[in-house]
Amino acid sequence: MARRRVQFRRAARLGDKGNAMVEFAIAAPIMITLTFGGAEIARAVSFYLSADQGLRNGVRYLARIPGDPTTKSWAVTNAKNLAAYGSITAPNPVPATVVMVPSTINNPTKTPVGSTSPETVTMTANVPFSSPLLSSFGVPAMTFRLTHTERVLGQ
């Protein structure tokens, strides 16, 4: 009877040798996908916040221009450069780390003077974001549509 117990324990120990490897082979791809997927989502959120902050800065610049800033081409160009590059002048050459380019920013609009709400300037931008990792899983490139409105302060 004691001999059978020993043989049973030995057989049980020998049968468990590959369990850890099989469990790792099943769990590792899932863990790796979740890790890198989370990193890509964090990168997309950071990209969105950077673009939003740039657009906000451009609209604030326009809101402080005296008169109607949407009719002054130099002001619109400066605001687009400020939104895209962080400066009213475009760098030469344009760095590869730029989040958005001025061509993705639509021309600003202004509410009329006689409206019930205060005068505001609004800018919108369609900023494309692509991720090689997400596209390898069939997720298409995303386009962030950003809008920011600021009350006109310049008179």
Image: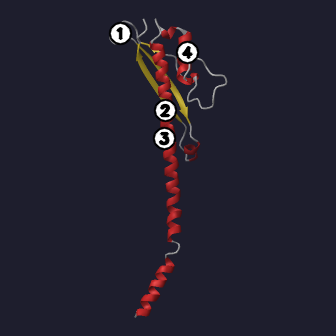
Residue identifier under label 4: 78
Q: Identify the residue at horizontal 45%, vertical 84% (top origin).
A: 9
Q: CA distance from mark 1 to mark 4?
A: 27 Å
**Disc 3 residue type (three-letter):** Ala
**Disc 2 residue type (three-letter):** Tyr
Residue identifier under label 3: 42
Could you tell me which secondary element the residue under label 3 belongs to?
Answer: helix
Choose the circle earlier in sequence order: 3 or 2.
Answer: 3
In depth, the one of 78 and 71 nearer the eye is: 78
Q: CA distance from mark 2 to mark 4?
A: 21 Å
Choose the circle earlier in sequence order: 3 or 1.
Answer: 3
Residue identifier under label 1: 115
Choose the circle earlier in sequence order: 1 or 4.
Answer: 4
48 vs 2: above or below: above
Please give the label number shown on residue 48: 2
Q: Residues within 10 Å of mark 4 (few under 14, many from 20)?
A: some
Q: In the rendered structure, are the residues bearing label 3 and label 1 in contact, judged by CB atoms less than 8 Å apart? A: no
Q: Identify the residue at horizontal 57%, vertical 45% (top origin).
A: 133
**Disc 1 residue type (three-letter):** Ser
Q: Identify the residue at horizontal 39%, vertical 11% (top origin).
A: 119
Q: CA distance from mark 4 to mark 3?
A: 30 Å
Q: In the rendered structure, are the residues bearing label 2 and label 4 in contact, judged by CB atoms less than 8 Å apart? A: no
In depth, the one of 115 and 53 nearer the eye is: 53
Q: CA distance from mark 3 to mark 1?
A: 41 Å
Q: Identify the residue at horizontal 48%, vertical 21% (top origin).
A: 57
